[in-house]
Image (cartoon, rainbow, N blue to C red):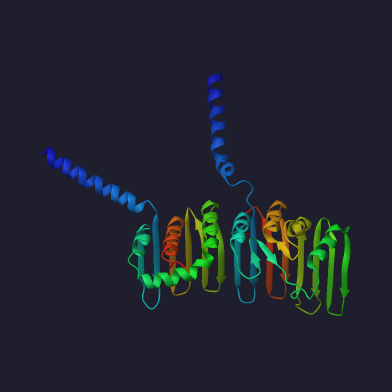
Amino acid sequence: MRKQLGGIVMACILAAMVATAPAAMAGPGERYLHVRVEDAAKGESVNVNVPLSMAEKILPAVNKGNLHNGHVTIGSAEMNDVDIRALLDAVRTAPDNEFVTVKEKDQDLRIAKSNGNIVIHVRDGKKGGEKVDITVPMKVVDALLSNAKDNELDVSAAIRALSDAGDALLVTVEDATEHVRIWVDSKSASE
Amino acid sequence: MVLLGKVALGIVGTAVAGVGVLCSEGMIEVKVVERQPEVHHVYVIAPAMLVPIGMHFAPQRKLSHAAAQIRPWLPTIRAALEQLRESDDLTLVEVKEPGEHVRVAKQGGSIVVDVEDRDDTVHVSTPIRVISSTIEQLAASAPSI
């Protein structure tokens, strides 16, 4: 009886090992960037799913325009002489706070630093107006500035930081009919 | 009789080895169903190795032109294919419109493209390995600068 019981327990352990093997063999914590665009009026939808490790490896191989070796070069002319690095660095080192609040008749804008994220909210008060929410983890901002020269942003490092930052809803844009969503999670399919 | 058996064994062995080599790069699968104006079914499954072999018969002038165009993007394509090969199966792009559905996915070592609309259904599956070797062959045919 004891031998039979032992055999059953061993069989259960083996079955459990076989059942969990595929999950254990899957890539260690692969994360995916998802983009979903839906247009309810036209009945259209577009889904894009990109493994972040793939984006991280491909970016340094693209050398076109301002993008070289995973770094984006920002010309002073493009930024109207605003020092984007100094600006980001100032935000990075500042405590949680509301930086910009603009309230107009039909539009609200709010830029803040909150819980380790830069948060941007735009609300268009008109009927069917746009709602935009952008959340960027500060780790990503840190990475953008980390290894780059003065007039550069390190996009590869930012993607690496994004994959370490956990599940995150980065961008949502909504209006009367369209819905855009960009987020990062560990699921290969956008659901 | 014994000699005949040996010859037969040799022929069969060679044929099996040949098929094995041809199929070593996987298979390309093309399925097309036309619904309008008439219903047509086309189903082709061919050894992927035929593509690099077929490249040898393509006109050199046209290959050189294509190679020159692809050259700046070679590092990007190489990196993308390498990462695709290593990644889990996933749907890369999916577009749905009323009456139309397009899906590009990585599935079991192949890139699979499915297009479905009111008139046609198209399914193409190509092993990533053969895409890589074809790109490399195309790159090699570029005129040296």
Instruction: Using the rendered view, name the quadrant where residue A137 is placed.
Output: bottom right
Q: Is residue A149 left or right of residue B94?
A: right
Tell me the residue at 80%/69% (across/down). A83
**Image spot of residue A100 (x, y percent):** 87, 69
Q: Which residue is most to the front?
A: B145
Classify the position of the C terminus of chain A by image quarter.
bottom right
Q: Is residue A130 left or right of residue B43?
A: right
Q: Which residue is most to the top?
A: A2
Question: Can residue A1 be seen in the rendering of this structure?
Answer: no
Q: Nearer the viewer, residue A174 or B7?
A: B7
**Image spot of residue B141 (x, y percent):** 41, 65
Give the total of numbered labels: 0
Q: Is residue A54 left or right of residue A110?
A: left
Question: Can residue A107 be seen in the rendering of this structure?
Answer: yes
Q: Is residue B22 left or right of residue A141?
A: left
Q: Nearer the viewer, residue A113 or B51?
A: B51
Q: Which residue is most to the left?
A: B1
Instruction: Using the rendered view, name the quadrant where residue A70 is placed.
Output: bottom right
Instruction: Using the rendered view, name the quadrant where residue B79 is placed.
Output: bottom right
Q: Is residue A66 above or below residue B45?
A: below
**Image spot of residue A26 (x, y percent):** 57, 46
Q: Is residue B46 above or below residue A2?
A: below
Classify the position of the N terminus of chain A by image quarter.
top right
Tell me the residue at 59%/47% (across/down). A27
**Image spot of residue B15 (x, y percent):** 25, 49
Tell me the residue at 71%/54% (across/down). A161
